[in-house]
Amino acid sequence: MRDTNSEANGKMTSDNELIYKYNRELFYHFDKDKGFTQKVDYQNPNNQVIIKQGWDAAEQRLDEVRQLVIQGKASPIAYYMEKILMEVPMLAAYMEIPKWRVKRHLKSKVFKKIKPETLVKYASVFEITVEELKHPGFLK
Amino acid sequence: MMDATKTIINYTHRQAGHCESGATSNLFKFNGLELSEPMAFGIGNGLYFSYIPFLKIQFAPMISFRNLPNTVFKRSTAYLGIESTVVKKIKDPREAMQMLDRNLEKGIPTGCQVGVFQLTFFPPEYRMHYNMHNLVVFGKEGNMYHVSDTVMEFPQLITYEDLLRVRYAKGAFAPQGKMYWINHAIDKPVDLKPAIVLGIKKTVYEMIGIPFPLIGVKGLRWMARDLKKWPRKHGDDKAAFYLGQILRMAEDFGTGGAGFRYIYGAFLKEAGEMFGNHMELLEASDMMGKTANKWRDFTYMGARNCKNRSKPEEDYGTLSEKLLDIAVSEEKVYQKLKKIKF
């Protein structure tokens, strides 16, 4: 297995293989002869695949929620919450309201009854306008 | 808030493999003690493992390859007997920023815990709700702060509002404005040896001594056994996502599972040299390096599964065995370290 490993790490990464090229990081390596070494490089292609998988999964979850909102089974808050990768406890912390209230707000029926000032706060957490919150672009 | 004052401390930004030990090492250097990143990491007990299957973070079981935030800074300063200050929680964000400004005026570079989701200069692919990141603020120019983030190749700029926001990110391990610094220049010589011994003992305890099955090597074994069951229990898609989570935690930021083992190995090597080419420490360092390479093999194998999740190339059983093998070789290192008489 040591061979595949050195192949994975030592191979010159040609740039077109890489998805993420924003910043080069410091990586440590170990080799029997050279001992421990440091190298500044982009994340290797192998790890980039793993990082991308995380984002693909997030996109898929967002798609699912979008469908639920279109079908009227979830409120736009559920969509925007997913869009900024939040879950109920975290959104409740930003909203400074109890979790059970946020959970209720995810239902489309309850959404219509939310007070305007609460909507304003949601909009500011999501960094959108109240109009966008009430009528997300994909519903039109 | 818009004042024209300009204070930039002469602080050296050095990139590092791990945010907190990098920040700690750079803060030491600024105060006159040359302490490498591996040294800070080793003395400060950066190495850790825990697996908490019943807690879900970002939709997957919670896996942590690192110690609680601030452990490295607190323990390394404590073990080395260097006076430092940690302000754990500041209620009012404006007050927290004022405290930071006062420190800068006094010429004290200050470490801050931040969340990365809204960290403007951070690589976009890493911007998840992860709150255990560290950076050092070393200057202010009007509304802009100069920060040294050891993930980044170069020092960065961030606005007052953005810095305030990341210092008050919410969620698990919320930073709550936490800040830390070394009180004054280190003018007398520091003996690293006693600190190294303390650091090694603590890490050995945390990895094999804690009588709880989800922490340290025991936790690693538990995770390996669970991994085997995931495809049958959750289906191929979810199993691949969970596996991806292990790999992300193991390889993100170049540290995690594999990376941390390299840093620790480098620490053991430096320590061995400091103790007059201590044979056992040097051997342990070699073993740790090999274990780190095994971790990298594991992520390499795992990544192929993530690429092609409907038809896993590698059997989850094989991956599980690989992890168990890693657990065995890690345990050997800690057992070896435990037996060393300094």
Image (cartoon, coloured by chain):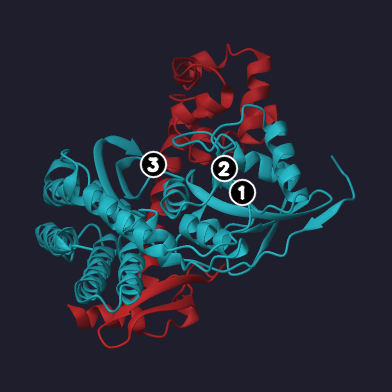
The numbered disc on residue B85 is 2
Side of A78 relative to B271 (left or right): right
Drawn colour of chain A?
Answer: red
| Location of mark 1 (residue) | B183
Q: Counting other residues with Cα less than 10 Å from the Cα at mark 1, is it few (<14), some (14-19), or many (20 or more)?
A: few
Drawn colour of chain B?
Answer: cyan
Secondary structure under tag 1 reads loop
* Residue B46 sits above or below residue B286 on the image: above
Image spot of residue B188 (x, y percent): 55, 62
Residue at left 12%, top 58%? Answer: B324
Secondary structure under tag 2 reads strand
Please count the marks in the image: 3
* Residue A18 sits above or below residue B326 on the image: below
Kind of residue sitting beneath label 2: Thr
Kind of residue sitting beneath label 1: Asn
Extreme residue toward the bottom, this view: A33
Q: Are dots 2 and 3 on a single chain?
A: yes
